[in-house]
Amino acid sequence: KAGVTQTPRYLIKTRGQQVTLSCSPISGHRSVSWYQQTPGQGLQFLFEYFSETQRNKGNFPGRFSGRQFSNSRSEMNVSTLELGDSALYLCASSPKDGSYEQYFGPGTRLTVT
Amino acid sequence: DAKTTQPPSMDCAEGRAANLPCNHSTISGNEYVYWYRQIHSQGPQYIIHGLKNNETNEMASLIITEDRKSSTLILPHATLRDTAVYYCIVRPYYNAGNMLTFGGGTRLMVKP
């Protein structure tokens, strides 16, 4: 079975721009979660989608948004990029609600200049 | 979710057992202990989880104290590839979501 895939793997953007990151979960998995990882703040939860509905949201500004499609693929969008948004963005998928095991993708490394 | 405390770093000799402690003194009755690890530049990887009994799988063993206030992850024969940051997380097994709250973790360095 193919793992979680994230595209693109690397991205460089300028302050003020917007960016869209994509995540394809493992086939059959219905839950997709997004995390931001920075050296200063560590791994922080952004949001989670289950069957196209956002179920949980972390403490991030409204510039961070996401969605999930009927095929469980998910996208996250960051508008009006700031330097502090430079981070590794990780996507994880789970086969069901409350699953003890989540499968993480390799991440998208976003650099904002 | 209950808070966990882990040492920031540990060293282990290759081939020896690595014992990574985790304190979760405020854990509640419906919360499980999960362990993940993150090898440099990769996404976190699930290792093992448990409620109150000791658990073992092909990667590691998890020892949970009787009062459930602390646990130890054991890598029986550490290799250089086990060098990673190890995260101990407590959360309900079933709730309305799959959110994980990561702490600082323990940076394990396996040395030849």
Image (cartoon, coloured by chain):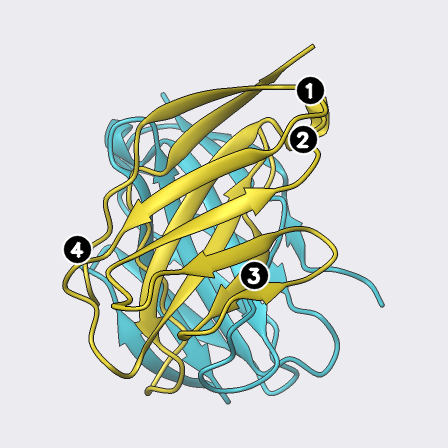
Question: Callout 3: helix, strand or loop?
Answer: strand
- For disc 1, the neighbor class at 10 Å (few under 14, some 14 to 19, many from 20) is some
Q: Is residue A55 above or below residue A107?
A: below
Judging from the image, mark 3 belongs to the subunit labelled B
Q: Which residue occupies the foreground of this view, A58 or B63?
A: B63
Task: Kindly report the distance in space between the C-alpha atoms of the residues bearing marks 1 and 3.
Answer: 21 Å
Q: Are marks 2 and 4 on the same chain?
A: no
Residue kind at label 4, given as amino acid type: Pro
Disc nearer the start of the sequence (2/3): 3
Badge nearest the viewer, 2 or 4? 2
Task: Kindly report the distance in space between the C-alpha atoms of the residues bearing marks 4 and 1.
Answer: 44 Å
Q: Report which colour depicts chain A.
A: cyan
- For disc 3, the neighbor class at 10 Å (few under 14, some 14 to 19, many from 20) is many
Q: Mark on residue B14?
A: 1
Q: Report which colour depicts chain B.
A: yellow
Q: Are marks 2 and 3 in contact (CB under 8 Å)?
A: no
Residue A47 visible to the viewer: yes
Q: Mark on residue A61?
A: 4
Disc nearer the start of the sequence (1/3): 1
Judging from the image, mark 1 belongs to the subunit labelled B
Task: Kindly report the distance in space between the C-alpha atoms of the residues bearing marks 2 and 3.
Answer: 16 Å
Judging from the image, mark 2 belongs to the subunit labelled B
Badge nearest the viewer, 1 or 3? 1
Tally the marks. 4
Badge nearest the viewer, 4 or 3? 3
Q: Which residue is mark 2?
A: B78
